Image (tube, rainbow, N blue to C red):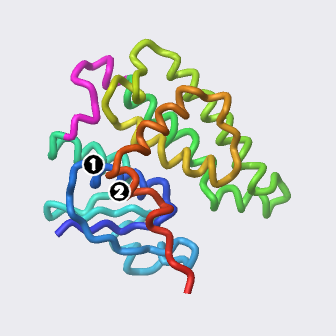
Amino acid sequence: MIRLYDYWRSSSAYRVRIGLNLLGLDYERVSVDLLAGDQTSGANLARNPQGIVPTLEIDGLRLTQSLAILEYLNETRGAGWLPEDAAGRARMRALAMAVAMEIQPVCNLRVARQVEASGGMAVPDWMQSHIASGLAAVEALLAHPQTGRFCHGTEIGLADICLLPQLYNAHRWGVALEAFPNITAIETAALEIPAIQAAHPDALAPVAG
């Protein structure tokens, strides 16, 4: 049994869902409601001492951190999410990290709310400003001869898996994407893939009671 401790709107959990779906792996989703504070429960902290999601239970292991999980899946399931050449792998990882380590931490909702509470920018303004500037940098990185249908060539890779959840957030917060033609073309191509459609937060949003 593969079990994913997940929140439907979490960017990091969305990445892992994409990866699992692309590999065709069956898994059980266990909701950790971030808005309700479930991430700080004793049960979740026992699984994930950082008090975050996702956590993936697979192969008798308990894995945390979405990029580490995706690298594990790539290595153990032959996913092909990294190029065979060292230079290509470096570029793919750099693109993935430009999203996962530069945009996402600044645009974490908890961070944005703390900024607003301290008298800084309102949450929507913060999100729009920092997501837009981060994506502008990614767009510049994609102005490269190895960019193809996807971030690096013609197949989905680690960078695409990281980029898609950030684009969900961009749409959520009303970020204009017209200035990013490479990014929007990649998003359009990726969202045509049924496995990715099934991982999308809109497909998993809780039904209001």
Where the C terminus falls, by quadrant? bottom right
Mark 2 or mark 1, which is nearer to you? 1
Residue farthest to the right, as pictured: 119
Task: Where is residue 123? Give x, y as percent.
Answer: 75, 57
Q: Secondary structure at mark 2?
A: helix
Toward the bottom, the furthest residue is 209
Is 87 covered by the magenta stretch?
A: yes
Q: Is residue 121 left or right of residue 47?
A: right
Q: Residue furthest top?
A: 145
Q: Residue at x 42, y 21 (%)?
A: 147
Residue range highlighted in magenta = 79-90
Question: Which residue is tagged 1?
Answer: 22
**Which amino acid is tagged 2?**
Arg
Picture coordinates of residue 40 (x, y %)?
49, 75
Residue 199: x percent and y percent? 39, 57
Residue drawn 56% across and 39% down?
Answer: 102
Question: In the rendered structure, which amino acid carries the disc numbered 1?
Answer: Leu
First-in-chain label (2 vs 1):
2
Evaluate whether residue 51 shows in this view: no
| Residue at image coords 41%, 35% | 159
Labelled disc at residue 17: 2
Q: Residues within 10 Å of mark 1 (few under 14, many from 20)?
A: some
The stretch drawn in magenta includes residue 192 = no
> Is 61 located above or below residue 23 in the figure?
below
Q: Residue at x 58, y 74 (%)?
A: 35
Instruction: In the rendered structure, find residue 196 and report the number of the disc placed on it.
Output: none
Compute the Cα span from label 2 to label 1.
8 Å
- Residue 31 lies, in percent from the top left, at 41, 74
Q: How many neighbours does mark 2 have within 10 angstroms: few (below 14), some (14-19), or many (20 or more)?
A: many
Tell me how many marks there are: 2
Q: Is residue 53 left or right of residue 86?
A: right
